[in-house]
Image (cartoon, helix red, strand yellow):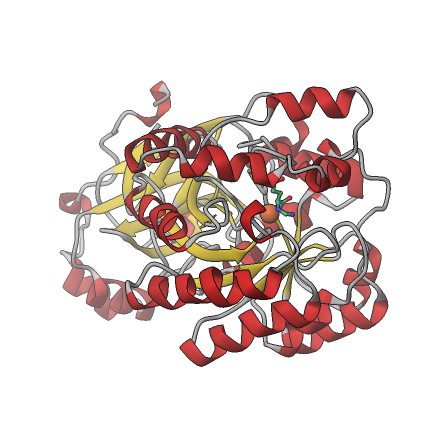
Amino acid sequence: MGPALRQQRGFSPDDVSHGGPLTAVIMCRHIHIIFAQMQGPQMILTHATLATMDGPLIRDGAVVLDGDRIAWAGPMADLPHRGEALDLQGRLVTPGLIDCHTHLVHGGTRAAEFEARLNGASYEEIARAGGGIASTVAATRAASEAELLRSAQMRLDQMRREGVTTVEVKSGYGLDIETELRLLRVARRLQGADVVTSFLGAHAIPPEYKGHADAYLDEQALPALRAAHAAGLADAVDGFCEGIAFSPAQIERVFLESQRLGLPVKLHAEQLSNLHGAALAARFGALSADHLEYLDEDGARAMAAAGTVAVILPGAFYTLRETQLPPIDLLRRHGVRMAVATDYNPGTAPMTSLTLAMNMACTLFRMTVSEVLQGVTIHAAAALGLTDRGRIAPGLRADLAIWEAADPAELGWRIGATPLHARIYGGRLDA
Ligand code: NIG
Ligand code: FE
């Protein structure tokens, strides 16, 4: 925690010349609402630059937290509260960042594949030769639950140090019933950020089912999905629709089962080719379609109509030295909301830095500062189907990031260092 965050005595209830909160109720309608909701301990952040995601930056702003909820946010001049205050001296405050697409839990590394690619092998060649995802599957199956938890927690801690307060975590490196469930159990045990899980049994065809994708779905992925749902381990269902993974017809089978179970869906779509996966996902009301380098106009139109969020993943684009840019202008034209995520995974995006993903989305894809900030807050929340976070507004979760910065452009501007000053998660301050 920086020195400026030492708790300072700000306003005191005793200073209120007209009396306590009850008097305030009579004075101002907003105060009535706030005090009616006040239950937990309060924290007041003062003299902040607020990116509420609900309007323009508020230059001299304040936020009032009540336990694990935001009670009030607005200009200092309108601050209705008296209490302990943290003077932020102009620092930027954003919602806690949301990384809405990660493969955080796995065993092993993929450093050898990194070297193979440096020597000219392509991602698809490596996958077809039994490397790639399959090598991580072998390492993951061999890892104990404790080992998986330790390494995933370490990666999550790196994310937390960049202001992340909510993270989506997929399974997909087990590819058998038992290991898929183990990955989701590990995800549920992660500490220090809110975890949203996605079941990704349809990530790759494991070696023992090579050439028998439908049998794999029947015997492993779909039973694992049902078991994960029954155990409350899956918040959503994902798939990888690609030549080296599952066909649209196979993904549709997974989505039909998800629909039957009442689970929302999302899809890795149009990453390496255009199989019209985004339109398929939209037909199932998907929360998001992710990657999208090869998305066409029909796909964008379908996503817009369904309210499906486009999750932009520049880390994988960068690692694979992809040249096909995701159609950002097309998404803008059709009004598709865009999120930005790390896609942390050991193969195509061994990157835990969400601010680096913001930088890459700006530099490689020409997304604007405002778009990438929305992409890791309000639109990332939408990609997870969450309405209780991603903005700074009364009633929402008290998850905030305080930055050693005065302007949102500074978050994506720096490379290799993140200017986080402190993080507030569930109303608690950590640094
Ligand atoms: O999101 N596209 C498929 N899945 C991952 C890559 C997984 C891997 O290579 O291990 C992704 O890029
Ligand atoms: Fe992914």
Q: Is residue 382 visible?
A: no
**Does residue 6 lie above or below 176 as drawn?**
above
Q: Residue at x 34, y 47 (%)?
A: 182
In this rendering, is residue 117 above or below 249? above
Residue 144, horizontal then vertical, whole percent: 32, 34
> 359 or 296, which is in the foreground?
296
- Displayed quadrant of residue 73: bottom left
Task: Work out whether 209 lies above or below 111.
Answer: below
**Is 394 located above or below residue 264 in the figure?**
above
- Quadrant of the rendered image containing residue 329: bottom right
Q: Is residue 319 visible?
A: yes
Quarter of the picture holding the C terminus: top left
For the image, the number of numbered tags is 0
Q: Quadrant of the N terminus?
A: top left
Rendered location of residue 141, percent (x, y)? 42, 39
Q: Tell me which residue sits at (46%, 64%) in the image.
A: 219
Residue 401: percent from left, percent from top: 44, 39
- With 201 as the anchor, is 364 left or right in this view? right
405 or 413, which lies in front?
413
Q: Is residue 164 left or right of residue 289?
A: left
423 sits left or right of 116 in the view: left
Quadrant location of ligand 1? top right
Residue appearing at x 67%, y 45% in the figure: 313
Return the x and y of residue 176 as percentages of the image width and height. Answer: 44, 52
Q: Nearer the viewer, residue 106 or 374?
A: 106
